[in-house]
Amino acid sequence: MPESDADLRARIVTGAIAAYRDADFHAVGPAEVAARAEVPEAEVRRVYPLWELLVVAVMDRWNNGSRRALWVVAERSGAVAYLRARLEVGRDDPALVRLRTALLSAASSPDHPAAGWFRGQYTRSFEDVTLALARDVVAGREPRGTSPRHAAEQLVALYEGLQLQSLLRDDVDPLGGFDRAVARMRIGWAAATASV
């Protein structure tokens, strides 16, 4: 029985994720994806006529799948625990961090065909953290009076910065660095609340 295009797309996305785990973003093309998916390269090009469509599909499954799976951590334990869990995933799967970092350039370029999608995903992720922090303040997990938006800016910057450092420095401990910085941030959030 022939494979449906939906099944073929899923198989190709799985192959692309495997290819990105094996090689740098710029070293992966249709041939590498086809080899990992065990399909002819012509099939990769047929079901993904624009390379950017495949990259979007990869990010939707790999990055957003991880984000959605970990959202329960935000619901149960808050934004800090959620971002820490995402750091753990990145530590255990550095290829995903490499791919996200490589795509920052595409997201910031208005001429890139998938720039709108990447920017939308980034904004949605930031808003998720902001919402989780608002809930944390209401639940008493973070100091009352904390600005969820400002706290989200700090936490996301910390999360992203530590991920980048973990790619470029051998001596970085992203989880330890996150825990230390969050402890200091919370002192600042509480102090800002007390001065209001």
Image (tube, grey):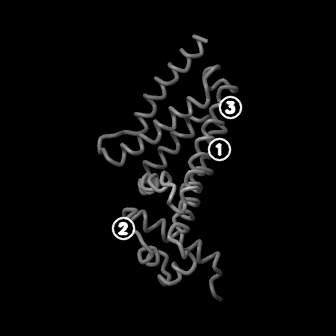
Q: Position of residue 168 (x, y in %)?
A: 32, 47
Q: How many marks?
A: 3
Q: Earlier in the sequence, mark 3 or mark 1?
A: 1
The residue under the point 64% across, 20% down is 145
Real-space Cα separation, disc 2 to disc 3, in angstroms: 42 Å
Classify residue 183 as left or right of residue 60: left
The residue under the point 36% across, 48% down is 167
**SS at mark 1?**
helix
Q: Earlier in the sequence, mark 2 or mark 3?
A: 2
Q: Which residue is mark 2?
A: 27
The label shown at residue 135 is 3
Real-space Cα separation, disc 2 to disc 1, in angstroms: 35 Å
**SS at mark 3?**
helix
Choose mark 2 or mark 3, whichever is in front.
2
Real-space Cα separation, disc 3 to disc 1, in angstroms: 13 Å
Q: Name the quadrant of the N terminus.
A: bottom right
**Which amino acid, by three-letter code, is at mark 2?**
Ala
Give neighbour class at mark 3: few <14, some 14-19, many 20+ (Cα, 10 Å). Answer: some
Q: Which residue is mark 1?
A: 72
Comparing 99 with 37, the one in front is 99
Q: Are marks 2 and 1 in contact (CB under 8 Å)?
A: no
